[in-house]
Amino acid sequence: MSIDNIAFADLYRQQWALNGRTEKAPEHWDRRAEKLAQGCDHPDNAYLRQLLAKIDLQGAATLLDMGCGPGSVCLPLADKLTHVYGVDYSQGMLQAARKRAQQAGVDNLRLIRRAWEENWDDLPVCDIAVASRSTLVADLAQALAKLNQKARLRVYTTHLVRPYFISPLIQRLLGREVTAYPTYIYAVNLLYQMGIYAHVDFIRDPRLPPDPEDFERFAESVSWSGGTLSCEDRQRLYELWQQQRRQGTLSTLIPPRDWALVWWDSSSTAGV
Ligand SMILES: C[S@@+](CC[C@H](N)C(=O)[O-])C[C@H]1O[C@@H](n2cnc3c(N)ncnc32)[C@H](O)[C@@H]1O
């Protein structure tokens, strides 16, 4: 069997369908905008530090940041470019990006409200296109192709390395259906089938083992991805926390949030 006969786009959609109930509406992100903006402003944001260092701006004057959130990528790079474009379907995220741009005195950012799934004909073609942590969409093949069409030089996308934000043990404990998200492996294979031979690099989560005294932070990280916790949820989580604490295995409760940077040179893609 040839690898070209494996329908990765269908496999992705099947895996996504298993997660159907977790597809997020813009309002989900509106509620997270402020917190994400705070995280972006934090000088110790290891994810952004590593990602920004890996984006090559040589020969570039413009950048399109798809799923830009509070301007995570387009804002810190704005002073190195002529124009940057932040695109997102969440009004709350765009507002947060606008506020951060004003605070930073950035005047070459244009924000556009748009979803991955909508028509992109009027979006500008830029030298660099980026999609950072925003590629969990129902049709990844279509999203990657759309992004590629908007880039003259290079495309940078980041994807999950592991299929979970919350460990399956905790998902089961909270009575949630265990959701396994598609990882970067799909992106690499989909691109391959589009004639794009992408590079893969990793952005490591330098997270230290959890502080045994800080249950609140742990509960907050579970609810960021797993939704609101009821009193019973919190109690169950607390008992698990105490048990793992006694056993010295607290770190197993929080899977490291590593990201795969999948990037390619758009000018050298054949047949796309
Ligand atoms: C985890 S945040 C990442 C934000 C930013 N790129 C970063 O790395 O900090 C995901 C972003 O993707 C956006 N997003 C998710 N699904 C989207 C869709 N279907 N169309 C447009 N934006 C989407 C969300 O609104 C959110 O701003």
Image (cartoon, grey):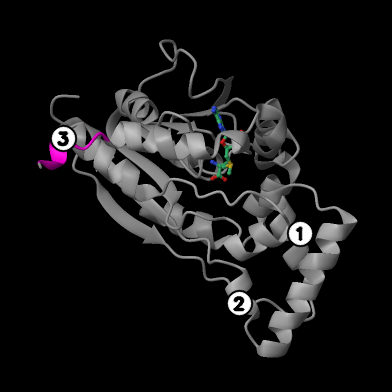
Task: Locate the C terminus by quadrant.
Answer: top left
Of circles 3 and 2, the one toward us is 3
Task: Locate the N terminus by quadrant.
Answer: top left
Residue lying at 41% horizontally and 18% vertically, measured from the top left: 124
Is residue 170 left or right of 12 when viewed as pictured?
right
Q: Position of residue 170 (x, y in %)?
A: 66, 63
Give the residue number, with chain letter if any, for mark 2.
251
Residue 220: numbered disc:
1
Q: Is residue 140 magenta?
A: no
Q: Is residue 55 visible?
A: no
Give the residue number, with chain letter if any, for mark 3.
5
Is residue 244 left or right of 182 when viewed as pictured?
right
Q: Is residue 58 above or below residue 10?
A: below
- At label 3, the amino acid type is Asn
Q: Is residue 180 above or below residue 90?
A: below
Q: Nearer the viewer, residue 110 or 229?
A: 229
Q: Is residue 86 visible?
A: yes
Residue lying at 41% horizontally and 49% vertically, measured from the top left: 183
Question: CB under 8 Å between callouts 1 and 3?
Answer: no
Residue 24: numbered disc:
none
Tag 2's secondary structure? helix
Q: Is residue 11 above or below residue 208?
A: above
Q: Which residues are magenta?
A: 2-7
- Would you call the spot at circle 3 few (<14 residues within 10 Å), some (14-19), or many (20 or more)? few
- Would you call the spot at circle 2 few (<14 residues within 10 Å), some (14-19), or many (20 or more)? some
> Spatial distance from mark 1 to mark 3, Cα to Cα?
43 Å
